[in-house]
Image (cartoon, rainbow, N blue to C red):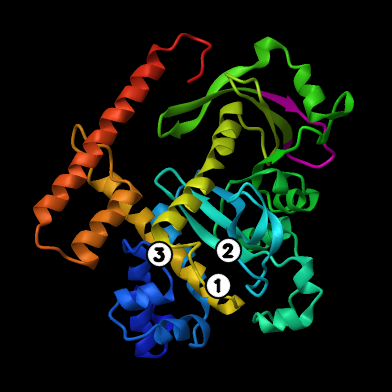
Amino acid sequence: MSRIAGRFVRVEPRRRVGDLVLGLLSDLPRKNCWSIAEWAGEASPDGMQHLLGRARWDADAVRDDVREYVLEHLHDEDAVLVVDETGDVKKGTHTVGVQRQYTGTAGRIENAQVAVYLVYAGRSGHAAVDRELYIPRSWTCDPDRCRAAGLGEEVVFATKPELASRMIGRFLDAGHRVGWVAGDEVYGGNPKLRSVLEERKVGYVLAVACSAEVTTSAGKSRADALAAKVPKRAWQKLSAGAGAKGHRFYDWAVIDLAEPRSGSHRLLIRRNRTTGELAYYRCFSPAPVPLTALVRVAGSRWRVEETFQAGKGLAGLDEHQVRRFTSWSRWVTLAMLAHAFLAVVRADAHAHHPAPDGLIPLTCNEIQRLFTTLVVRPVRDVAHRLHWSAWRRRHQSRARHSHYQRQAALPPGSIG
């Protein structure tokens, strides 16, 4: 909190923002201005609402502080920037950016608010470092509605890939370097975003649809048509990274593309070893890289889902009950800070305090549980809480060991 303290001129908002972040890290079943204000001992939610809506402080400056905090502690030369959107289901029509639209959170079209996030994913951890709210055309075409929600007159419609490009540009313009960007079909299918990354010499592994047209030395073809011609010997079984139940093994193949632009352009194909389902990625790197490097980057895309899950489940990222843009940007920025704290503590614990035999390493969930119990709200029976922490980790260690044993016993060619 001392890192962002200078963003608050008055002592009252400086203290209150600390209480709000602690509330986001607490074990409250529902986190909003009302519940956090009561938890923090305040007489009413007015102070918390003032902090989010009317107090003088710059959420974008705090966002930059969060980015620097994450980069300082999770820095990795091989890190990947992952871009993705997530939606929060909302009622009514007055919450900024809300409309009926598809959201992966619900898995269908719902009345929802959607935001695009930029996640920094390194070997020691991952956390969101930027955010942009998606403002649909139904809003940008209605200036009165935008003003009522606190959006400035300069707001114009921007696609999700354009928002991603804006965030990646901020990251690079701040002086940080990264070798790779990953994203799903929304971003891989956008040639402007791909061109921006190529111009800045940033590699990418971006998913594309099976119908995407690519150019090889033999001419233009659909991605799925090229996949059908890949010989059996060209497929390689490689892990896309370790998950909760062991390594995620798939079959992979790569095809060189003929592009007039400089750099290495390739089509990466992933095949599910059980169902045979295929996925496709457009890839670029300033210089040729081995297949294993492309697979590693493709596997990093799952980190954004883990970040969303932890940000929402542990830090209240999706639990804001605010309507105006200023309040939204402040809430999600502070939730990003709360989750980044957990990610940094986890990385430090793994690096300097290895787990004893029989226990899995500390997770963000376990760190939040211990932090809430021992620091935020101390209890008398500390030994009891520590006992339960060890019990959970011991149980998880046995489960993971069983998963790896079962994986090792599977015959060649079966799923990993």
Q: Element type at marker 1? A: helix
Q: What residue type is disc 1 on?
A: Ser
- Dot 2 falls on a residue whose secondary structure is strand
Q: Position of residue 179 (x, y in %)?
A: 58, 46
Point 51% across, 72% down: residue: 321
First along the sequence among labels 3 and 1? 3
Who comes first in sequence, dot 3 or dot 2? 3
Q: Which residue is mark 3?
A: 30
Asked if the residues shown at circle 2 and circle 1 are in contact, with their CB atoms under 8 angstroms apart, the answer is yes
Residue 18 screen position, x and y as percent: 34, 76
Q: Residues within 10 Å of mark 2 (few under 14, many from 20)?
A: many
Q: Which mark is residue 329?
A: 1
Dot 2 or dot 1: first in sequence order is: 2
In this view, the residue in front, 145 or 127, is 145
In the rendered image, which residue does mark 2 sit on?
131
Q: Which residues are magenta?
A: 253-264
- Mark 3 or mark 1, whichever is nearer to me: 3
Alpha-carbon neighbours of circle 3 within 10 Å: few (<14), some, or many (≥20)?
A: some
Farthest-out residue, bottom = 10
The residue lying toward the viewer, choosing from 17 and 102, is: 102
